[in-house]
Image (spheres, rainbow, N blue to C red):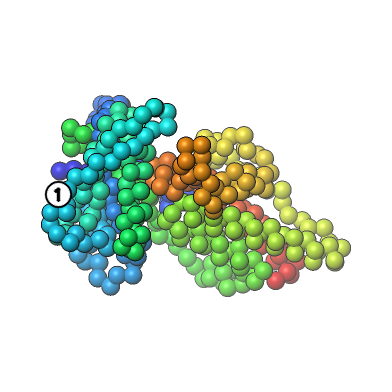
Amino acid sequence: MEGPERVSIDIPKNRQGYTFAVDVRSEGTTDIPRGPYRVVFVLTSAFLIFEDDLSAIVPEEGFSYARLATPGTATQVLTAHYTWSNRPGGREARVSLRSKNNLLQAVVVEIPEEEIEVAALCSGQIVANLLDALAFIKRIPIQIRHVDVFPAAGRRLARRYATFPFGQVNVDEQNFRAAASAPPRLLPSLRHVHQAIGSTQPPLRMLSLCSAFDSLKQVRAQNNADLTAKRITPDRPKTRVPDDEVIRQHFPSFLGKPAYGFLERVYSDLRKHVAHPNLDAAGGLVVDPAKSLTHHEVDWNNEAMLRVLWELIRDEWSLMERHGIR
């Protein structure tokens, strides 16, 4: 049967809510099988949480609000033409649908690529274009839950791209008291962080984090003005970019540097491309939301940005409490 065996793993807190590639290998092997590949995009919708009865829905199998009008629709095979930026000319991939009881559950792409990363990116673009147009035509929300990559001639999973869920945390009376006493001036920043944490779309998460940073800059300016009027020097700690795994691996040049500098770099380098449809030389989006499931640049930036922003907001909250600023 296609799909991975079920396993239970502990997901570190700083990995929850983010998307990763999980390679599945046979015992004693280290190599990922080469292509061609069959890439299965299992569908879902964030609006599932509003359904009254979820008993008949198995998220692992896929779900969508697209019901195939005729049984024959699922047997149709489309031909998709695609290009890869590092290679001249184009290639063809075969696209088919997977359904159950006429409910569209997944889109399957058979693609003649030998490298698994290239196969994931190119097939992801094919499916994203298809779903973008379908969502527009039928006006329904349709998302990708996870992506499974198989060798074209086999049934053993080679890689899964999946978003890790959140785990439960303990909340006590002190947490609620602290939340209830949050300084009103700081609430816009907290709201944007809340929206970022709750977003399942990495580009939208980044926009919310950037909005939280904008709001925090305004709060700091207001607090500085209030303290200066009282002839008090703002006593914030000089927050630095922390030394952790994500920073060391993806942003080593910022280790120990001022936190503001890192946030400004993300803001200037990525936010403008996420917020606006800026195109690259090949006519594609500079930061393409369609790539966020299999290409994790935005996710890594989000994780580091949230860590740094959390420290800065916490420091500002403490400063406001010390000086009675509301």
Query: Which residue shows up at 54% across the image and 52% down it?
Result: 276
Nearer the observer, 219 or 232: 219
Left or right: residue 26 compared with residue 209: left
Could you tell whether 302 is left or right of 317 in the image? left
- Quadrant (top left/top right/bottom left/bottom right) for the N terminus: top left
Residue 134 percent across, percent down from the top left:
31, 56
**What x and y, as percent, mark residue 122?**
35, 38
At a point 32% along the width and 60% down the height, the residue shown is: 137
* Residue 76 as seen in the image, left or right of residue 233: left
At 47% from the left edge and 37% from the top edge, which residue is drawn? Answer: 282
The residue sitting at 12% across, 57% down in the picture is 71
Query: Up-down: is 267 above or below 57?
Result: above
User: Which of the 4 image quarters holds residue 27?
Assistant: top left
Nearest to the observer: residue 278 or residue 322: 278
How many other residues sit within 10 Å of disc 1, few (<14), some (14-19) or many (≥20)?
A: few
* Circle 1: residue type: Thr
Residue 323, compared with residue 12, is above or below; it is below
The mark total stands at 1
Question: Looking at this rendering, what residue extends furthest in the left direction?
Answer: 71
Task: Residue 227: name its quadrant.
Answer: bottom right
> In what element is the residue under mark 1?
helix
Decide: is 263 above or below 195. Answer: above
Q: Is residue 146 visible?
A: no
Q: Position of residue 290 (x, y in %)?
A: 40, 47
Q: Which residue is mark 1?
A: 75
Residue 53 seen: yes
Q: Viewed as shown, does residue 245 lie left or right of 311? A: left
Quick one: 48 or 119, which is closer to the camera? 119
Quadrant in which the C terminus appears? bottom right
Q: Quadrant of residue 158?
A: top left
